[in-house]
Amino acid sequence: MRITVLIENRPSTTDSRLAAEWGLSLHVAFNGHNILFDTGASGSFANNAEHLSVNIPSIDAVVLSHHHFDHGGGLLRFLELNSAAKVYLGRTPNGDCIGKKYGLINKYIGLDKTLIADYPGRFETASEDIEILHDVFIFPRILGSHPKPHGNKHLFLKIGNALVPDDFTHEIIMAIKEDGKFVVFTGCSHNGILNMVDTVASKFKGVPIKAVIGGFHLIGVPPLNFIAGTKSEVRGLARSILDYPIEKTYTGHCTGTPAFKVLKSVMGERLIDISTGNRFEV
């Protein structure tokens, strides 16, 4: 399985042609299939894909991790370039997704609501577990025995005139089985990385996890790069991840640089950061 980071917060250190933005988009080449996991915040992922020799019209399926603009802002560009692939996403939130900054500024951070109406037949809501391609699974119901990230406290749903904490029932997991092991894709892990891994493990008991790939939402208020919670809690999370049968963990985007350094101090070579333009095999 080959993963290409089409876009991420940090720019490429080797190719100045590649744009970076607050967002995430991954191309997954697996078993003859081409999968797009998230689309970043704009159409820039597609420009980067061209430079990286990733053919967007040949994508077989899109998986949208959750209903935030930094993961689905490039959907329109994708739909213009690809006329066939289904877009799989979680249940529509009960209200408008809102990010609250500095306790004062409320900003809509959801998806373009016109897309489903403008492109009927292209979207499929995953309300139950589904195998979208052979050995490619989506899980919309995420277990919840572990705490969710502290950074969620800035994220809300606007229902009428009220703001209520986002419960992130619109977040989904993608897991791909290869050579008897799973690779788990988490997007932002708003439900908590451990809860997401537990969900996959509960469906396929005893199957080891080759890799976990995605953000962990350990950042405070994006794009301000500070840790939500404490360093001690982040170290505890790192130790918990090491207790799981996970060979490698790849993270970036909403994990944040300070939190990554704390995780790395505990996890060592089992933790790898990602940035725009990275390409790796798992």
Image: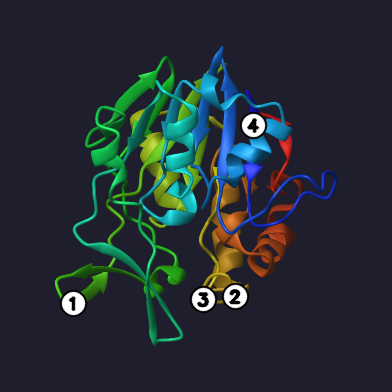
Q: Which residue is mark 4?
A: 3
Give me the C-alpha separation between circle 1 and circle 4: 40 Å
Query: Residue 11 got which mark?
Result: none
In the picture as drawn, the residue positioned furthest to the top comes out as 32
Q: Which residue is mark 3?
A: 229
Residue type at mark 3: give it. Gly
Give me the C-alpha separation between circle 3 and circle 1: 26 Å
Q: Is residue 83 visible?
A: yes
Sooner in the amino-acid sequence: mark 1 or mark 4: 4
Q: Nearer the viewer, mark 3 or mark 1?
A: 1
Q: Is residue 34 visible?
A: no
Q: Residue at x 44, y 65 (%)?
A: 149
Vertical placement of 273 versus 29: above or below?
below
Sooner in the amino-acid sequence: mark 2 or mark 1: 1
Q: Nearer the viewer, mark 3 or mark 4?
A: 4
Q: Residue at x 56, y 43 (%)?
A: 25
Q: Nearer the viewer, mark 1 or mark 4?
A: 1
Query: Residue 162 got which mark?
Result: 1
Residue type at mark 2: give it. Leu
Q: Which residue is mark 2?
A: 224
Helix, strand or loop for disc 2 = loop
